[in-house]
Image (spheres, grey):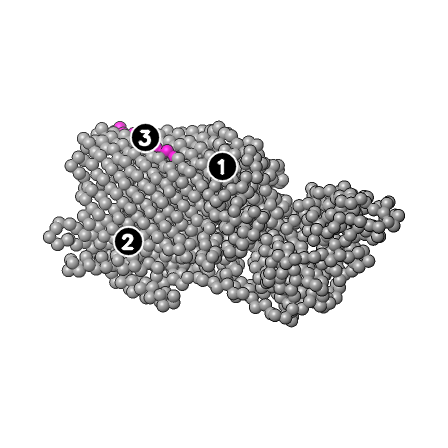
């Protein structure tokens, strides 16, 4: 009897020890990839679906593919990406920060637009996740951060980007969201040597950029941009940026100050007035 | 995999059956009990095994047993005192530095101790310590006269959530010929990796003691406790994320990394403790004891941190459906989470990819380890004298010298190459408000394993002489005591950060002088009926967090730093009969000058602020009722009920200062008058039935019902500033403290004790086995519930930063088998 008790005890102890990883279902979540379609619609075609001042819900499985040409790396762009293909560009409004870490410039992305909406902000066409007008004002929401992978698929990285060279006459809404290069421009005398924005009070500002051939485009900079406190150069030359509009105002969004190549002699009062040939530095891209 | 899982399940079921058939008893009080329940959420997730009763654990007071071992699930605290105090070898291991508490280190192997005394609702203690709640006086001295070996094996499981096994071995020599006794013990705990949600636990506790006696009057003892542990940590979550995840024990702390579960939130301990005990008894009347102890080693905790990058926490409020106004989008996101539950855990591969692709390999996401290097010396001297047969006198000194060196190390760069030694506060737009952590070595690139960030040391001391007199009479027993203490607190900074020049250097000691007094009278009406009354007054040093608002980066104090005061009175009626014990107590404690400090992001100012509250005055009053009786010869009933009314009786002051320059942003009154000051339930009813059909076999059931329990409020939002900005209805909703549902929990256990002899020897084998089920009906009970300090100061939407919860894991099964060979 005593031996039996001992044996039972020893067996129980051993059994007890062996039991330990019992009865557990390991929570393994297999990450599933969203199914992105093969057929691609051009950004130009997508943009055509939009009527200014309206919001169009995209019910069809429409896919666009384009390259990220501007993001929030330098805080001049907030919660959005600018994507372009050969036909046009568009703003993708995304409810997330530090997008540049996932979608650096040059990333080729495929975007599933189904269930998204086309809207415009002051005539700038954008792709958003929702609209709400209950407050009397159209409030849009970007794609929620957890759903980025639902709507955006990274296809390739480090895609080359060539800005589209345009002159003032060619600036039109079809260029919205595209990376453009303008030549022979300089900041107006009043905006030369000024900060790009009010860094101290975090207020955005527009600085007028004059074409030597005539015309003005505004360089719009956020007060949060890390170069907001930098001074606008006084020279003449090339500026690269994303074309944007604010109602009827033509704007250029800089990605960083490397987009500004104004080192040549100013044309104001000289070449411009005398209608002499324009020269400037070569584009780095 | 599924087959293996089924086999394991089958094993478990078979064992449960066995345990039900053969579970035995070593329980004296019949209470499901444990000394080893540590009072934090991590312990809650891992220590389910330790609620199983043992001889040591149960105390003489059923109310205390209910509260300590069954009531924590409801935050059931007695008299506003959250923590029970353990005095081990005459030393308490509590420090004013960050409220450090060494009880869990000392009692890592809880069954090597014997309990000397248990105090509850009493002012007289032979140690000189006192408390209204409870004090356990424990000793590590080997008191066994015979050699023995004890082997113990236990495990607990909460299906799909928790799994912990432990093995303990204790060897005691008994009294050797040279009047020396030796003890040695080891306990190993293991919860395997990937057991969710806390991840894992590995711990080893080692104990050794030697005691020498001479002349039957004097003794000298040395004990060593050594704890090494490494465990994951759980996390609280909002109701929304708990529902989304469909997991009551959801934790946002972990994620997937290289196709394995990865737990960056961990805690490590490596702390040897040595105590030296000396006792001299001149005679039965006069005794001196001197106890000294030292703790050294390191404690550490790690967490995922980030700088200049998107918030990686999957339960960040901006990632949850409730953040979005559009209901269609809410629904879309909710469905997305249901289809992709992995989105509710951290994707470390993505974080590593970001780190790897950054310029130069700068880590934006990394695992930081906060280290606390300990050096603490605590001690006590006690002289006790029986002046007359009915008059005893005791005096003594408690003293403590504590030093904790706080510093960070880079634990894991998550695929990156370096980390800039910057402070990385992020505001809500992920814009970094960074500054140099060490301006003398700016822009330093820190590698994995290197020290970075704040580097400072806090020192504190306490010197507390005390005396007490007790007079025992035939009708009255009286005792009176006085104490006086000198407390000091100082900081030394080892690096100068970019914000505060004074962050480097020594502050010297802030010194506080405090006193306390207590008196007790017991009136014996007859042999069965007693009346007891207690009065006390305490003046206490300000808390650490008031003396140093944020010692990581500056030496500023709270503007409300002041001596805290406590006054109290208690009146009890006690009834003692052979088959019935009962008591009822009414009490009232008044607390003055309590303070609170928090650092948080203030949405209205769009910056981090230090929030300080001062001049909080509260009252805790209530009634406690206990009854112990035997319904039948072998059926015992314990019942206890508490009614608590705790509230602030005045409004309090508050202020917010900008963390970058300590400039005042806002100050005023908090409208907290008449608000609850405790989140313990207002009314709790508890009973236990203990049935002992045969000697050594016990079946027990404990049920507790808690009513009127509130979540722990954050008081800052209840300010005049908010009141004038919202309409009266919104204000009343903001000011009111949210109540939790009334809840009940039922725990059951079986235990069996028997002994046999080894054949042909005189050796005794003592077997004790026990098994139990905690929260048998799987009730969904928030163990922890609190309002977030962050509040929507822009739109005053109460639901933007909703309360957070840690839910009880649910029904958990425990089995323990112990064999002692003597």
User: Badges 2 and 3: C-beta atoms under 8 Å apart?
Assistant: no
Note whether B484 is above or below B158 in the view shown.
above
Neighbor class of circle 3 (other Cα within 10 Å; few <14, some 14-19, many 20+) is many
**Residue identifier under label 3:** B381
Q: Quadrant of residue B23?
A: bottom left
Q: Is residue A73 left or right of residue B373?
A: right
- Mark 2 lies on a secondary structure that is strand
Q: Secondary structure at mark 3?
A: strand
* Residue B556 forms part of the magenta stretch: no
The residue carrying pointer 2 sits among few (fewer than 14), some (14 to 19) or many (20 or more) residues within 10 Å by Cα, namely many
Residue for badge 2: B153
Q: Main secondary structure of the magenta part?
A: strand
Residue span colored magenta? B376-387
Q: Earlier in the sequence, mark 2 or mark 3?
A: 2
- State the image coordinates of residue B585 (x, y, percent, origin top left): 38, 45
Q: Quadrant of the N terminus of chain B?
A: bottom left
Query: Which residue has dot 1 on it?
Result: B455
Element type at mark 1: strand
Q: Nearer the viewer, mark 3 or mark 1?
A: 1
């Amino acid at each position: 009897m005593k031996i039996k008790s001992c044996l039972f005890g020893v067996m129980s102890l051993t059994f007890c020890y062996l039991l330990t990883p019992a009865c557990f279902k390991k929570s393994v979540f297999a990450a599933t990839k969203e199914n992105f379609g093969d057929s691609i619609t051009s950004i130009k075609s997508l943009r055509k679906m939009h009527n200014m001042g309206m919001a169009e819900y995209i019910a069809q499985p429409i896919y666009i593919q384009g390259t990220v040409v501007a993001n929030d790396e330098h805080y001049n762009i907030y919660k959005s990406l600018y994507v372009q293909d050969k036909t046009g560009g568009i703003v993708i409004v995304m409810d997330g920060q530090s997008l540049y870490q996932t979608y650096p410039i040059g990333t080729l992305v495929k975007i599933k637009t189904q269930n998204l909406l086309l809207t415009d902000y002051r005539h700038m066409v954008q792709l958003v996740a929702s609209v709400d007008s209950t407050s009397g004002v159209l409030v849009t929401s970007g794609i929620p951060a957890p759903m980025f992978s639902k709507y955006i698929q990274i296809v390739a990285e480090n895609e080359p980007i060539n800005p589209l060279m345009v002159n003032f006459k060619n600036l039109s809404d079809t260029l919205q969201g595209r990376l453009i290069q303008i030549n022979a421009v300089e900041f107006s005398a009043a905006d030369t040597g000024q900060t790009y924005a009010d860094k101290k009070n975090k207020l955005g500002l527009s600085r007028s950029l004059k074409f030597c051939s005539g015309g003005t485009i505004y360089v719009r900079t956020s007060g949060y941009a890390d170069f907001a406190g930098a001074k606008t150069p006084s020279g003449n030359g090339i500026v690269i940026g994303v074309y944007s509009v604010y109602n009827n105002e033509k704007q250029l969004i800089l990605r960083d100050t490397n987009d500004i190549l104004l080192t040549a002699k100013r044309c104001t009062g000289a070449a411009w007035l005398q209608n002499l040939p324009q020269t400037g530095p070569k584009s780095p891209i | 995999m599924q087959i293996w899982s089924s086999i394991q399940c089958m094993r478990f079921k078979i064992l449960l059956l066995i345990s039900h058939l053969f579970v035995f008893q070593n329980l004296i009080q019949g209470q499901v009990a444990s000394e080893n329940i540590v009072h934090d959420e991590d312990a809650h997730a891992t220590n389910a095994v330790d609620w199983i009763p043992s001889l040591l654990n149960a105390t003489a007071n059923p109310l205390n047993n209910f509260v300590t071992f069954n009531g924590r699930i409801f935050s059931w605290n007695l008299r506003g005192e959250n923590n029970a105090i353990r005095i081990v070898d005459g030393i308490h291991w509590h420090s004013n530095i960050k409220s450090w508490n060494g009880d869990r280190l000392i009692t890592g192997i809880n069954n090597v101790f014997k309990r000397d005394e248990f105090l509850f609702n009493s002012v007289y203690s032979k140690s000189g310590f006192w408390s209204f709640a409870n004090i356990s006086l424990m000793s590590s001295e080997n008191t066994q006269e015979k050699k023995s070996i004890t082997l113990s094996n236990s495990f607990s499981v909460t299906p799909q959530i928790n799994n912990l096994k432990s093995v303990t071995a204790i060897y005691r020599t008994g009294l050797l010929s040279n009047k020396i006794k030796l003890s040695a013990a080891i306990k190993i705990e293991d919860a395997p990796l990937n057991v969710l949600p806390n991840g894992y636990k590995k711990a080893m506790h080692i104990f050794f003691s030697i005691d020498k006696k001479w002349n039957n009057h004097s003794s000298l003892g040395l004990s060593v406790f050594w704890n090494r542990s490494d465990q994951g940590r759980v996390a609280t979550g909002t109701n929304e994320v708990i529902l989304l995840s469909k997991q009551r024990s959801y934790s946002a702390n972990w994620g997937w990394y290289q196709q394995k579960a990865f737990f960056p939130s961990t805690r490590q301990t490596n702390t040897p403790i040595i105590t030296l005990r000396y006792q001299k008894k001149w005679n039965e009347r006069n005794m001196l004891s001197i106890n000294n102890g030292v703790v050294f080693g390191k404690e550490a905790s790690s967490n995922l941190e980030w700088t200049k990058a998107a918030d990686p926490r999957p339960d960040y409020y901006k990632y949850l459906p409730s953040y979005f106004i559009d209901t269609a989008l809410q629904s879309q996101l909710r469905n997305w989470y249901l289809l992709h539950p992995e989105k509710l855990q951290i994707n470390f591969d993505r974080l590593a990819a970001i780190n790897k692709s950054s310029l130069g390999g700068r880590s934006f996401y990394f695992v930081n380890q906060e280290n606390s290097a300990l050096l603490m010396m605590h001690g006590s001297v006690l002289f006790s004298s029986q002046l007359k047969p009915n008059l005893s006198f005791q005096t003594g000194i408690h003293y403590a010298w504590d030093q904790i060196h706080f510093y960070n190390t880079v634990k894991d760069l998550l695929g990156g190459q370096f980390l800039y030694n910057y402070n990385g506060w992020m505001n809500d737009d992920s814009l970094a408000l960074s500054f140099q952590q060490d301006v003398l070595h700016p822009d330093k690139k820190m590698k994995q394993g290197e020290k970075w960030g704040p580097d400072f040391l806090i020192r504190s001391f306490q010197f507390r002489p005390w005396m007490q007199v007790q007079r025992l009479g035939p009708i009255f027993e009286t005792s009176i005591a006085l104490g006086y203490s000198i407390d000091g607190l100082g900081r030394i900074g080892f690096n100068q950060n970019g914000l505060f020049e004074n962050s480097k250097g020594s502050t010297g000691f802030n010194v506080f002088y405090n006193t306390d007094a207590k008196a007790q009278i017991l009136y014996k009406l007859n042999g069965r009926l007693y009346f007891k009354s207690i009065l006390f007054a305490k003046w206490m040093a300000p808390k650490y967090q008031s003396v140093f608002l944020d010692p990581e980066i500056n030496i500023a104090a709270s503007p409300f730093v002041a001596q805290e005061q406590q006054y109290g009175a208690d009146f009890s009626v006690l009834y003692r009969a052979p088959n019935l014990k009962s008591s009822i107590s009414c009490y009232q404690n008044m607390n003055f000058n309590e303070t609170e400090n928090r650092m948080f992001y203030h949405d209205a100012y769009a910056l981090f602020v230090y929030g300080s509250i001062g001049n909080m005055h509260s009252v805790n009053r209530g009634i406690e009722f206990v009854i112990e009786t035997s319904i039948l010869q072998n059926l015992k009933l314990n019942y206890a009920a508490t009614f608590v009314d705790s509230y602030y009786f005045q409004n309090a002051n508050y202020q917010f200062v900008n963390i970058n320059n300590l400039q005042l942003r806002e100050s005023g009154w908090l409208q907290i008058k008449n608000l609850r000051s405790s989140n313990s339930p207002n009314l709790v009813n508890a009973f236990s039935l203990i049935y002992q059909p045969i000697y050594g076999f016990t079946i027990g059931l404990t049920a507790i019902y808690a009513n009127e329990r509130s979540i722990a409020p954050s008081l800052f939002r209840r300010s005049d500033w908010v009141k004038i900005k919202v309409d009266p209805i919104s204000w009343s909703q903001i000011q009111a403290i949210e109540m939790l549902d009334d809840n009940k929990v039922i725990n059951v256990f079986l235990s069996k004790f028997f002994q046999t002899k080894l054949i042909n020897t005189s050796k005794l084998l003592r077997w004790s086995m026990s098994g139990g089920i905690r929260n048998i009906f799987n009730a969904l009970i928030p163990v922890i519930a609190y309002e977030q300090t962050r509040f929507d100061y822009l739109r005053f939407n109460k639901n933007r930063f909703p309360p957070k919860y840690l839910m009880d894991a649910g029904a958990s099964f425990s089995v323990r088998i112990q064999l002692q060979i003597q």
